[in-house]
Image (cartoon, helix red, strand yellow):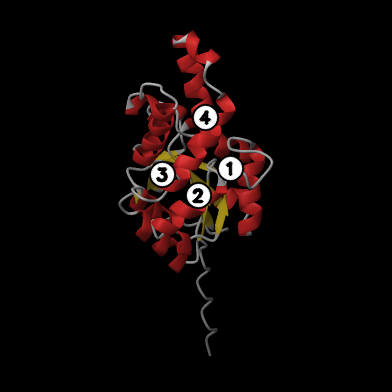
Amino acid sequence: MTDDPMPAPTRLRRYAAVTFDLDGTLVDTAGEIVEAVNATLVEAGVTPRPAPEIVNLIGNGLRALMMNLLARLMLEQPQLADRLSVEVLLHRVEVIYGALAGRSAQAYPGALQALVDLREAGIRTGCVTNKDGSFTQRLLQATGLAPHLDLVLAGDTLPHKKPHASVLRTAAERLGVGTDRLAHVGDSRTDIDAARNAGVAAWAVPYGYNGGEPVALAMPTRLFANLSEVALHVLAERLPIAA
């Protein structure tokens, strides 16, 4: 009588969770951000700025974008400092953007299916962004992505924003995975630095907003053409079997 053969060992997937940046990674929001910023300037009697200039400032939240743009404007036109109130403009841009958020934004091709495929395979998913929470939730709902995310960390969820190490470490903890089994996907140096600082895989897509600099220059661990490729990679890669 022969012994029953030993069952083949199960190989776990290398990554148990994947988090994604929002603006420029999951969702194309540039159009409505440009519209809100320029509407705020026009309301204040300031000439609108070119769209590429505003897009190059996307990445650290709307207030940071507006503050950087106003600093640039006041350097170029010092007389504006005497008649513009920074606090008033910061308030107005949030009000105006609040009325626009989600109206024209679109999920990038493949984003929804990537989230669906990952979760169906048991991979936890999250959105980690520096955008304020109210805007984040509105965008995720409007684009249909919200039901397919296990976690959302916005710019006002934690004491710090990306690229602080605590942000993605908190994401790993709340998703119930080790940092060694979490990958973060973004479109900017901020995302790559956030991932490296937290000790998670630093992945990128090339089509988002990175201040006019190709994200490849930030040296991500992997650069994917789109989110469909991200999902395929996660679902295919397995941990090696211990001898």
Residue 231 visible (yes or no):
yes
CA gap between label 1 and label 3 equals: 16 Å
Q: Are marks 1 and 2 in contact (CB under 8 Å)?
A: yes
Q: Residue at x 41, y 37 (%)?
A: 36
Q: Can residue 208 be seen at all in this image of the molecule?
A: no
Q: Compute the Cα span from label 4 to label 3.
A: 27 Å
Looking at the rendered structure, the secondary structure element under dot 4 is: helix
The answer to whether residue 102 is above or below residue 202 is below
Q: Nearer the viewer, mark 4 or mark 1?
A: 4
Image coordinates for residue 124, horizontal then vertical, percent = 53, 60
The residue under label 3 is 25
Q: Which residue is mark 2?
A: 136
The Cα–Cα distance between marks 1 and 2, rounded to whole angstroms, is 9 Å
Indicate which disc residue 89 carries: 4
Relative image position of residue 24 (x, y in whole percent): 40, 41
Counting residues from the N terminus, which is met first, the one under dot 1 or under dot 3? 3
Q: Nearer the viewer, mark 1 or mark 3?
A: 1
Residue at disc 3, secondary structure: loop
- 25 or 193: nearer the eye? 25
